[in-house]
Structures are given as C-alpha cells and as structure tokens.
C-alpha cells in the first residue's frame, strides 16, 4: 500500500499555522490533554497525519500537524499510531475469522508524561548504541 502525502500547498499552510513551533499536543504525543509541545521546528519538521494515513487517508490541512521529529514524531509513531493500526488489523482479522489470543493485545491505558520520558530515553539509548 502506497503512503499518501500532503500537497506542498497544505504543508506551506500548515507550517505557517504552526508559527515554527511543534503542534504536537495531548496524549497521542505523550503530553497531558490540551498541552502543546511547542518545540522550535528549526531543526526539522514532520508533517504528521493526525489520523494515521493507514487508517484515514485524509490529506486535508485539518489532519496535518507540524511536529518535531525527535520527541513527538517518535512517540506518536511507536506509542499511538502503531497500536491504533494494530487494532484496525485485529478488527479486519476478526471479520475474516482470524483470531488472536487476548494476551497478545496491547494495553489500552493512556500514555503518561513518565511513559514519554521513558520511551524517549530508550530511543536515545538505542541511537547511542548504533553509533
Ligand atoms: Zn513536539
């Protein structure tokens, strides 16, 4: 399946809206509800599908968030999108009569700030080990 991208125009408008600061906010990005990351985007920006591309196929400006590549993108990709995509796959499997055992299901607990800190420390250690 090919991944759809935002248009250049959508990216321009989204970046303008961000004011040059990370738009990651709330539990999907490992932050408390309503809290925005606001990290400066001068060292790189990811145009993130708030509703994961795999599920939503929504390339509108409303679904585009300018987020920081390190903290927010990594957290959302691994801790939010991956479990959400896995859930869609499980539902499809169930429709097709393919079952998984309950113990394979990930926890549904919302991530806390401590989870984000631990996760980022683990990712940093992994990158350190790669050098
Ligand atoms: Zn961020």
Image: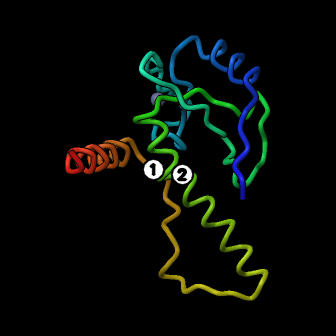
Structural crowding at the residue carrying mark 1, measured as other residues with C-alpha within 10 Å and reported as few (<14), some (14–19) or many (≥20)? some
Cα–Cα span, label 2 and label 1: 9 Å
Q: Residue 9, percent across and down?
A: 76, 20
**Residue at the image point whose x is 53% and y is 62% from the top:** 108
What is the quadrant of residue 14 in the picture?
top right
What percent of the width, then of the height, locates residue 15? 63, 17
Residue 112 to residue 108: above or below: above
Badge 2 local density, few (<14 within 10 Å), some, or many (20+)? some
| In this rendering, position of residue 12 left or right of residue 83 | right
Q: Is residue 96 above or below residue 21?
A: below
Residue 39: percent from the left, percent from the top? 43, 21
Residue 31, compared with residue 100, is above or below; it is: above
Residue drawn at x 54%, y 43% is 28
Q: In the figure, is residue 81 to the left or right of 72?
A: right
Name the quarter where the N terminus is drawn.
bottom right
Q: Which mark is residue 80?
A: 2
Q: Position of residue 20 (x, y in %)?
A: 53, 13
Disc 2 Cβ-to-ligand 1 distance below 8 Å? no
Foreground of the two, 17 or 54: 54
Rendered image coloring scheme:
rainbow
Which numbered circle lies on residue 111?
Answer: 1
Earlier residue among tags 2 and 1: 2
């Amino acid at each position: 399946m090919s991944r759809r991208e935002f248009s250049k125009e959508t990216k321009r408008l989204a970046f303008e809206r961000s004011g040059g600061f990370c738009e990651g906010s709330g539990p999907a990005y490992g932050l408390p509800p309503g809290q925005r990351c606001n990290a400066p985007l001068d060292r790189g920006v990811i145009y993130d599908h708030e509703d994961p591309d795999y599920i939503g196929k929504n390339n509108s400006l409303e679904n585009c968030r300018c987020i920081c590549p390190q903290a927010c993108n990594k957290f959302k990709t691994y801790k939010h999108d991956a479990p959400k995509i896995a859930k869609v796959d499980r539902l499809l499997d169930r429709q097709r009569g393919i079952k998984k055992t309950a113990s394979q299901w990930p926890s549904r607990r919302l991530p806390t700030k401590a989870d984000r800190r631990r996760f980022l420390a683990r990712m940093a250690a992994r990158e350190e080990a790669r050098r």
